[in-house]
Image: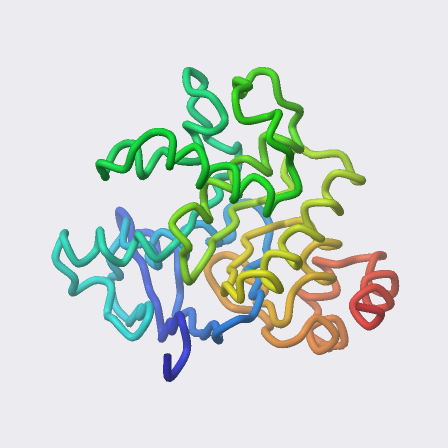
């Protein structure tokens, strides 16, 4: 496609008289990993709700694949969402369904594809996230936290989306498993060429896997650029956010 995958211009959102997004602007280029970072309540998830069409802007523009999201009909929005994979913070797997049914859920619900074919498709996606066939018939309760996250990613890529949104992909995981998930996000970009938006407060993740990132605080874009550019910013809010980890993060981002 020509132009950015996602284009956000002067996005403002007011809810019950409170302005929670205050003129946010950025674009996400095709094939890149773009992270939205910030503390709790900064507005990170509010931005993604506009990208997938759950919220409409009070003012400003949000375009995805060149389409103004707020102007789409419900059918057009459903079609757009098929091209967006979403990895939920807690995985959001269906506890009553087996792994392969979770991964193939879209096809079970919205197509007449035979169950055998859906299972084969699930196996293909499971292998892309470095899991093996023996997990297909397990229930989510039988999986570790890291495996649950991988299955949720496999479900997100089941429809071969052009854009994947990862909502706090390392939340609740130990440091070693978190870095494994980081590597998986990078590997999937290499294998599929998919564009990714990562919403996170995990600084190590954001500053090691991102091509570019934006730091948001209280609905305001504080800094944006490559990890090195943001870390070298003289903005005191950036220094406050990264704190004593600045030198470590700078060395990590420049070694990738």
**Count of picture labels:** 0
26 relative position to 11: left or right: right
Residue nearest the observer in this picture, 143 or 133: 133
Give the residue displayed 69% in from the left and 66% down from the top: 238
In percent of width and height, residue 59 lies at: 25, 68
Q: What residue is rendered at 66% in x and 59% in y?
A: 186
Residue at 33% from the left image edge and 52% from the top image edge: 18
Q: Is residue 115 above or below residue 26?
A: above
Percent across and percent down for residue 75 are: 14, 53
199 vs 195: above or below: above
Residue ranking furthest to the bottom: 2
- Residue 134 x %, y %: 62, 25
Figure check: 15 above or below 11: above
Residue 243: quarter of image: bottom right
Quadrant of the drawing holding the C terminus: bottom right
Q: Is residue 59 left or right of residue 125?
A: left
Comparing 198 with 224, the one in front is 198
Quadrant location, the N terminus: bottom left
């Amino acid at each position: 496609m020509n132009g950015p995958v996602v284009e956000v211009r002067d996005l403002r959102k007011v809810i019950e008289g409170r302005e929670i997004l205050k003129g946010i602007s950025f674009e996400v280029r095709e094939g890149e990993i773009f992270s939205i970072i910030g503390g709790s309540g900064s507005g990170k998830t509010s931005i993604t709700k506009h990208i997938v069409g759950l919220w409409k802007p009070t003012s400003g523009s949000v375009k995805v694949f060149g389409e103004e999201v707020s102007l789409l009909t419900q059918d057009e929005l459903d079609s757009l969402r098929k091209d967006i994979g979403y990895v939920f913070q807690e995985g959001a797997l269906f506890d009553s369904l087996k792994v392969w049914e979770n991964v193939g859920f879209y096809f079970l619900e919205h197509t007449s594809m035979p169950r055998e074919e859906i299972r084969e498709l699930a196996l293909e996606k499971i292998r892309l996230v470095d899991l093996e066939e023996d997990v297909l018939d397990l229930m989510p309760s039988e999986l570790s936290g890291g495996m649950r996250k991988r299955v949720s990613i496999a479900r997100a890529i089941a429809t071969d989306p052009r854009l994947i949104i990862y909502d706090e992909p390392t939340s609740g995981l130990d440091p070693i498993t978190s870095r494994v998930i980081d590597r998986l996000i990078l590997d999937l970009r290499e294998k599929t060429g998919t564009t990714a938006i990562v919403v996170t407060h995990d600084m190590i993740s954001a500053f090691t896997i991102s091509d570019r990132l934006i730091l948001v605080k209280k609905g305001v874009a504080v800094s944006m650029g490559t990890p090195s550019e943001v870390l070298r910013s003289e903005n005191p809010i950036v220094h406050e956010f990264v704190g004593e980890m600045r030198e470590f993060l700078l060395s990590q981002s420049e070694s990738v």
